[in-house]
Image (cartoon, rainbow, N blue to C red):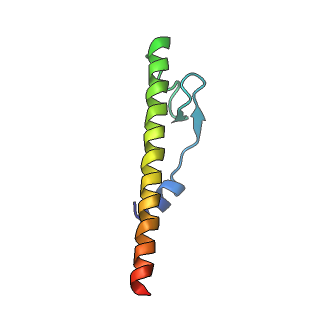
């Protein structure tokens, strides 16, 4: 993501609301949550489980990338010196 897209997103950010049912955010353009409005309670529980799993996977990938960056920086510093 470039700086232009970052500034575009900051300038054009619309107000959002957190859904009380599923916990996801959606813009105020919608009358009801587009993520869970047509789902049963059982489906919402499954949606929350999927969201939790995806967040854990994202954290894991983030930790791996941070570790790889630290190792790469260490190797580069050893090569330079």
Residue 51 on image: x %, y %: 46, 31
Is the residue 52 above or below the residue 32 in the image?
below
77 or 56, nearer to the observer: 77
Residue drawn at x 60%, y 24% as measured from the top left: 20
Is the residue 67 above or below the residue 37 in the image?
below
User: In the picture provided, is 78 more to the left or to the right than 13?
Assistant: left
Residue 64 on image: x %, y %: 43, 53
Residue drawn at x 45%, y 46% as measured from the top left: 60
31 or 22, nearer to the observer: 22
Is the residue 12 above or below the residue 28 in the image?
below
Q: How many marks?
A: 0
Residue 27 on image: x %, y %: 52, 37
Residue drawn at x 59%, y 34% as measured from the top left: 17
Residue 74 on image: x %, y %: 45, 73
Q: Quadrant of the N terminus?
A: bottom left
* Residue 35 visible at all: no
* Residue 22 visible at all: yes
Occupied quadrant, residue 46? top left
16 or 71, nearer to the observer: 71
Q: Residue furthest bottom?
A: 81
Occupied quadrant, residue 2? bottom left
Q: Quadrant of the C terminus?
A: bottom left
Is the residue 73 above or below the residue 36 in the image?
below
Residue drawn at x 49%, y 32% as measured from the top left: 52
């Amino acid at each position: 993501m470039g700086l232009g897209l970052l500034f575009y997103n900051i300038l054009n950010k619309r107000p959002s609301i957190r859904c009380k049912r599923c916990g996801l955010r959606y813009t105020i353009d919608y009358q009801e949550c587009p993520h869970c409005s047509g789902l049963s309670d059982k489906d919402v529980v499954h949606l929350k489980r999927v969201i939790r799993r995806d967040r854990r996977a994202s954290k894991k990938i983030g930790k791996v990338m941070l570790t790889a960056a630290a190792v790469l920086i260490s190797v580069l510093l050893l090569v330079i010196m």
